[in-house]
Amino acid sequence: MMRNDDTPITLDLFADQAPITPGQVEQIGQQSFVLRGFALPWLDRLLPALENVLQAAPFRQMVTPGGFTMSVALTSCGVLGWTTDRSGYRYTADDPQTGHPWPDMPHVFRELAQAAAREARFEHFEPDACLINRYVPGARMSLHQDKNERSLTAPVVSLSLGLPAVFQFGGFERSDKSQRIPLFHGDIAVWGGVDRLRYHGVLPLKPGEHPRLGAQRINLTFRMAG
Ligand code: MD3
Ligand code: FE
């Protein structure tokens, strides 16, 4: 099975499962969906816009309030961007590294995020923040809840690019058992409503080389933060 950009779909952990096809919609929770390959037709427009954002606001590794440097490198675009440092997690209007506002959210980002939200039956999605995460092999994100946003029922839309990853989708307590869901280049996950505060994380990225993105995974999450 190949995707329409010629990337084979393989992730050893899921070798015994049915193949995944672009266009497929998987419901992973009451109000959580994975839209397989949804972004593929948008990427010729989206990737150059992403390059521009990354030039204005490069990836940087941030420090958690507990003093640990995150293995994932981050940046943001939109009216608000997310930061962590020794004093806590928060959204800010300015990039603390430059003192300037975060780069504008490109129109194509917003249009794609809105189209995906509608597909998952969330209307009126007006994202004001786009967090951009970069995983290199070995980078991971431990189980957490996203709760720095003003509304904790508005959906979050997430776009996966580059190397595949295993997403952990848990419950409402850190100790709840979690499902493991593979996320591939071009997939979009949308979750909100009753699922908005579910714990989630990403297992350490496996080494590899993606034909378009190289040895990395980039994840964009669109939120209504303010
Ligand atoms: C959460 N990012 O930036 S997004 C984050 O792939 C973050 O970089 C991860 O968690 C990443 O805060 C995961 C994918 C996702 C998909 C479905 C979810 C997160 C979800 C359902 C419920 C809660
Ligand atoms: Fe998260």
Image (cartoon, helix red, strand yellow):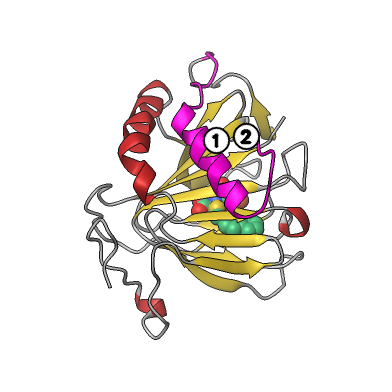
Residue 82 in view: no
Q: Is residue 77 magenta?
A: no
Q: Which amino acid, mark 2?
A: Pro
- At 69% across and 44% down in the image, what residue appears? 123
Q: Residues within 10 Å of mark 1 (few under 14, many from 20)?
A: many
Give the structural element (helix, strand or loop) at label 1. strand
CA separation in Å, label 1 and label 2:
7 Å
The reply to whether callout 1 and callout 2 are in contact (CB within 8 Å) is: yes
Q: Which residues are magenta?
A: 99-125
Q: Quadrant of ligand 1?
A: bottom right
Quarter of the image for residue 82 reads: top right
Q: Is residue 131 visible?
A: yes
Q: Nearer the viewer, residue 1 or 172?
A: 1
Quadrant, the C terminus? top right
- Reading the image, the residue beneath label 1 is 130
Whole-percent x, y for residue 62 in the image: 52, 37
Residue 127 circle label: 2
Cβ of mark 2 under 8 A from ligand 1: no
Quadrant of the drawing holding the N terminus? bottom left
Q: Is residue 108 left or right of residue 177?
A: left
Q: Is residue 147 above or below residue 6?
A: above
